[in-house]
Image (spheres, rainbow, N blue to C red):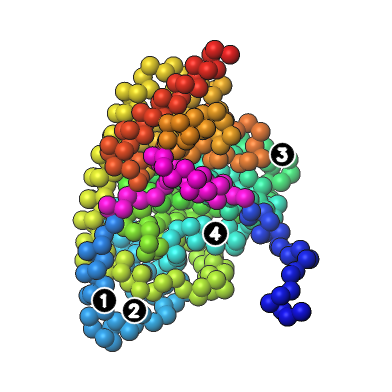
């Protein structure tokens, strides 16, 4: 029998990591999107295609490639952490975001690492710090894709209570104290938080809590250093409210916070450029891991981002993007006020930025994939949402079952409004059936 005719009967042996990474929420959610393609999607966390900077990218690439020697340089390999001159450009832009009068002159550009979106930075930092059985503390709720990454790493995920002002410092203190009493404080590696317009809740950590979270981590770094992994992916998508400094900016030592940002939401996810600011002693481990993976993210894409930053065309583009998202956020909130006002027990967050509205239903109304509400919404009303339970550790017995994440990212204002109308119809129907029984 030839090799091509051979049928393998023995099972393929997968690594523990691959097994832990299977059946993640994002895969099932994407499957639901395909199977319910006729629905209005309030689920997809994609950016609005109408915001993508086609002409700006074309003009910028023309400038980068117009001179043949210079064009060859940007089409050549870069370096694993990103070329120094590009990291200096990122540092200057970060200084603008932080309102730094000295342009962050004290921050070595070597502590900035350019990555393939901020997701790669989250992955690399976790790989560098977390062994199976190590502990990561997360806000409840939090970014469910990162929960999947932690599960694949074999981490123990411990939720910390959050409210309308973000992760609660007192609860972080109590959780760290409890882990100390259990004798496992030495296994705590990370505190993960989305600091601006959280995915999924839309909430930002309040100004007064930011230094308190840092102080809690510093106090409990008794035998080893615990790090805050600050995910600031939505930082630039601000439509109202105060301008907030990062948690990272309060860390005078620059030893306790990893800051992760991306240009995917504000410019283009197809370009996939992000960056991290790392403690000095974490740079080499992260770059070693990155070197094994790709020995440097796309050099042309990095140069494209830095070009539009230097010309400040990026800044003009962000203003257009945020104006469009603000209109759609307002459309979603106005529609929620109109269509949910007569449904008791429903509440929702009014976010100052980002792409999401977090809605809570009466506690007896479940929103999961197998719930009557999800079936009614997708099969009858033709609207999709993300069940809120995905945003809590799957091992947590107390995770709420009655919440949902609603995105105004891909729909236009009319689509957002119609989607909310349909969703309210589905909720009203399920409540009426529940009351009747």
**433, 327: nearer the viewer:** 433
Q: Secondary structure at mark 2?
A: helix
Measuring from the top left, give residue 225's x and y in whole percent. Answer: 59, 54
Q: Are marks 1 and 2 in contact (CB under 8 Å)?
A: yes
Lower position in the chain sequence, tag 4 or tag 1: 1
**Image position of 244 (left or right of 225):** left
**Residue at the image point whose x is 44% and y is 77% from the top:** 79
Residue 277's tag is: none
Q: Cα distance, mark 3 to mark 2? A: 54 Å
Q: Mark 3 or 1, which is nearer the eye? A: 1
**106, 14: nearer the viewer:** 14
Lower position in the chain sequence, tag 1 or tag 2: 1
Lower position in the chain sequence, tag 4 or tag 3: 4
Measuring from the top left, give residue 133's x and y in whole percent. Answer: 70, 52
Q: Residue most toward the top?
A: 436
**Image position of 107 (left or right of 394):** left
Measuring from the top left, give residue 23's x and y in whole percent. Answer: 62, 50
Tell me the residue that label 1 is attached to: 64
Tell me the residue that label 2 is attached to: 74
Residue 123's tag is: 4
Q: Cα distance, mark 2 to mark 4? A: 26 Å
Lower position in the chain sequence, tag 2 or tag 4: 2
Q: Secondary structure at mark 4?
A: helix
Mark 1 neighbour density, 10 Å: few (under 14) some (14–19) many (20 or more): many
Measuring from the top left, give residue 393's x and y in whole percent. Answer: 61, 41
Tell me the residue that label 3 is attached to: 181
Q: Secondary structure at mark 1?
A: helix
Q: Cα distance, mark 4 to mark 1? A: 30 Å
């Amino acid at each position: 029998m030839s090799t091509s005719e051979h049928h393998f009967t023995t099972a393929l042996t997968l690594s523990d990591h691959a097994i832990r990474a299977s059946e993640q929420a994002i895969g099932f959610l994407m499957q639901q999107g395909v199977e319910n393609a006729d629905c209005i999607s309030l689920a997809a966390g994609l950016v609005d295609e109408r915001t993508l900077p086609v002409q700006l990218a074309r003009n910028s690439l023309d400038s980068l490639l117009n001179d043949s020697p210079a064009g060859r340089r940007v089409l050549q390999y870069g370096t694993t952490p990103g070329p120094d001159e590009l990291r200096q450009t990122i540092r200057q832009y970060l200084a603008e975001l932080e309102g730094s009068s000295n342009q962050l002159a004290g921050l070595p550009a070597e502590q900035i690492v350019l990555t393939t979106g901020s997701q790669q930075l989250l992955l690399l930092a976790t790989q560098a710090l977390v062994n199976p059985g190590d502990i990561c503390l997360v806000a409840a709720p939090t970014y469910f894709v990162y929960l999947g990454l932690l599960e694949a790493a074999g981490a123990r995920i411990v939720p910390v209570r959050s409210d309308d002002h973000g992760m609660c410092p007192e609860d972080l203190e109590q959780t760290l104290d409890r882990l100390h009493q259990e004798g496992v404080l030495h296994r705590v590696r990370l505190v993960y938080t989305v600091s601006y317009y959280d995915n999924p809740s839309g909430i930002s950590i309040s100004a007064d809590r930011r230094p308190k979270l840092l102080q809690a981590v510093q106090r409990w770094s008794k035998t080893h250093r615990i790090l805050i992994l600050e995910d600031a992916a939505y930082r630039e998508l601000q439509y109202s409210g105060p301008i907030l400094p990062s948690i990272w900016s309060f860390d005078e030592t620059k030893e306790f916070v990893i800051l992760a940002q991306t240009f995917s939401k504000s410019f283009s996810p197809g370009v996939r450029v992000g960056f991290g600011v790392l403690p000095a002693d974490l740079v080499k481990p992260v770059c070693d891991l990155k070197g094994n993976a790709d020995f440097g993210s796309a050099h042309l894409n990095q140069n494209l981002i830095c070009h539009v930053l230097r010309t400040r065309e990026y800044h003009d583009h962000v203003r257009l993007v945020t104006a469009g998202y603000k209109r759609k956020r307002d459309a979603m909130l106005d529609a929620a006020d109109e269509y949910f006002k007569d449904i008791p027990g429903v509440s929702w967050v009014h976010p100052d930025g980002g792409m999401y509205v977090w809605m809570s239903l009466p506690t007896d109304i479940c929103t999961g994939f197998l719930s009557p509400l999800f079936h009614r919404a997708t099969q009858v009303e033709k609207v999709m949402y993300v069940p809120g339970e995905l945003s809590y550790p799957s091992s947590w017995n107390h995770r709420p079952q009655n919440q949902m994440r609603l995105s105004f990212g891909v729909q236009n204002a009319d689509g957002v409004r119609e989607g909310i109308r349909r969703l309210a119809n589905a909720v009203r129907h399920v409540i009426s059936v529940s009351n009747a029984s």
